[in-house]
């Protein structure tokens, strides 16, 4: 009796058994494309630029053009803003080549987050 129950539970439809790998691959690729479309939809306008993001944009442009932060320091540990808060430099270092190669826009500024 237990053997019959196990075979009924483990049994899959014939169509699913024959094309299981192909169906899963197509489903995964479709989900990735839908995710990318929804993620990149209006990436440059939603949401608008916040204060800390505007400060980072200035720092990134400064690193891309001059190799220093907005205060003229070469490779500082933290980025000091007008408000005196310390922000990590990793964001600006990672994003500076993108701004240098593709020009400054909100898409290139936010691209590495995606």
Image (cartoon, rainbow, N blue to C red):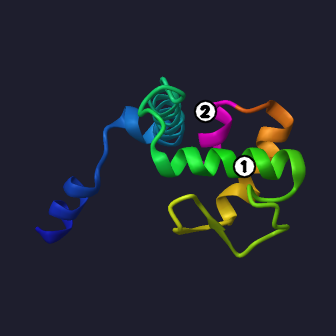
| Secondary element type, mark 2 | helix
The residue under the point 54% across, 34% down is 29
Q: Nearer the viewer, residue 63 or 26?
A: 63
Q: Which residue is mark 2?
A: 106
Image coordinates of residue 7 in percent, x first then y, are 25, 58
In this picture, residue 31 sits left or right of residue 98: left
* 64 in the magenta segment: no
The residue under the point 75% across, 44% down is 61
Q: Quadrant of the N terminus?
A: bottom left
* 109 in the magenta segment: yes
Compared with residue 73, is residue 57 higher up or lower down, i.e. above or below?
A: above
Q: Quadrant of the C terminus?
A: top right
Q: How busy is the neighbourhood of tag 2: few (under 14 within 10 Å), some, or many (20 plus)?
A: some
Q: Nearer the viewer, residue 73 or 102?
A: 73
The residue under the point 64% across, 44% down is 57
Compared with residue 70, is residue 18 higher up or lower down, i.e. above or below?
A: above
In this picture, residue 13 sits left or right of residue 106: left
Whether tag 2 and tag 1 are in contact, CB under 8 A, the answer is: no
Marks counted in the figure total: 2
Q: Which residue is mark 1?
A: 60
Which residues make up the magenta segment?
105-114
């Amino acid at each position: 009796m237990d053997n019959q129950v196990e075979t009924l539970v483990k049994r899959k439809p014939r169509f699913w058994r024959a094309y299981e790998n192909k169906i899963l691959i197509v489903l995964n690729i479709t989900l990735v494309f839908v995710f990318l479309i929804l993620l990149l939809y209006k990436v440059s306008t939603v949401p608008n630029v916040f204060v800390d993001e505007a400060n980072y944009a200035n720092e990134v442009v400064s690193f891309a053009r001059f190799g220093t932060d907005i205060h003229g320091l070469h490779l500082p540990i933290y980025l000091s803003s007008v408000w005196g808060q310390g922000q990590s430099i990793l964001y600006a270092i990672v994003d500076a080549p993108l701004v240098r190669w593709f020009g400054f826009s909100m898409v290139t500024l936010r691209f590495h987050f995606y």
